[in-house]
Amino acid sequence: MPDPLLSVTGLSVVYDTPRGPVTAVDSVGLTLEAGEFTAVVGESGCGKSTLMYAVAGLLDPPARVAAGQVRLHGQDLLTLGRRELDALRWRDFSVVLQSAMNALNPVTTLAAQYRDAMAAHGTYTKDEIRARSTEVLALVGIDPVHLGSYPHQLSGGMRQRAMIAMALLLTPDLVIMDEPTSALDVVAQRSLMVQIKELQQLLGFAVVFVTHDMSLVSHFSDQLLVMYAGQIVEQGPTRTVFDHPAHPYSRGLLEAFPSVRGPRVPLRGIPGSPPDLASPPPGCRFTPRCPLAHDACHHTAPDLYEAGAARSRCLLHLTEAAR
């Protein structure tokens, strides 16, 4: 079997604080094949953005990778120096950040920013840079006349599409997207998601899409990872997780979103708050909020257990497997 495009194993990220080290990402693993669309979902503060920053090598102190491997095309990115990583960024993988207004340089035009990205990874003529910049803008539905525009002259949706176009300049194999639709209205969100999926199918790149909105990726992702308190609590095919959620937290997230189809049902939400990662509870971290918790949950930390086509970090599935 060939190596997967991206393989993350045992990845842990620690924030050094005055109270001591806080583990924001705890022994996370994921595998991404070429052309696959994987979504990472969970509440704010669960560690999903920190996970993606660690994968992309964008962590700054006080954050640091404490353990694990991040292999892209079989090469461990965590062992590379800054210059070696810079050579891979945009060319082999690229990142679309949450706020395009903050990610784009406010005092230079799109053309200048695209030119800088291409010039850092090869020798191109002005005509080649202009042609490629025009091409990627057309791919995301923006008139090339906006190459002369500054970020503040574009709408929120156009800025996000301009960032996606920039991420595709050098045709990377992997695009990491950290909540790129969070600042958009629901109509613009849907339009952007459809466009991302169409571009992925056209160009064949793989996507890791980080969001707190499970419903946003229900029809677009192939695999779904649900994170809670720094850990993956469920992972599996997206339709499996949506149709038959194996972890109580996944069920709680799904019940917290209204449906526009089917019978009217009350929204239930999830009681309580996520734990303090500086001193997480013993046993299962979801126990204080879990309606199905039993005695063992308070002192036994669960692993990821097989749950049909998915895997779930819940002792209920350990009990079922033992039967």
Image (spheres, helix red, strand yellow):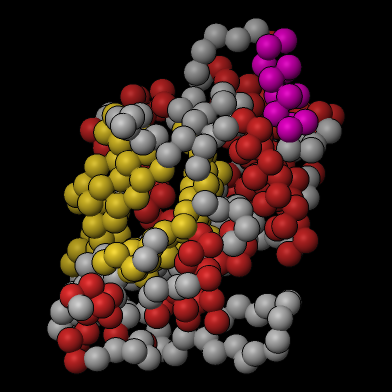
Instruction: Tell me: residue 185, above or below residue 50.
Output: below
Prevailing secondary structure class for the magenta stretch in the rendered image: helix
Magenta residue check for 124: no
Residue sitting at x 72%, y 57%:
190
Q: Is residue 56 left or right of residue 209?
A: left
Q: Which residue occupies the foreground of this view, 177 or 163?
A: 177
Residue 230 in sight here: no
Residue 215 in sight here: yes
Q: Position of residue 68 (x, y in %)?
A: 22, 47
Q: Is residue 270 left or right of residue 66?
A: right
Residue sitting at x 41%, y 43%:
32
Q: Position of residue 18 (x, y in %)?
A: 22, 67
Q: Position of residue 38 (x, y in %)?
A: 48, 50
Q: Quadrant of residue 104?
A: top right
Instruction: Tell me: residue 203, above or below residue 131.
Output: below
Residue sitting at x 62%, y 58%:
219
Instruction: Tell me: residue 246, above or below residue 40.
Output: below
Q: Which residues are magenta?
A: 127-139
Q: Position of residue 248 (x, y in %)?
A: 40, 80
Q: Which residue occupies the foreground of this view, 68 or 276?
A: 68
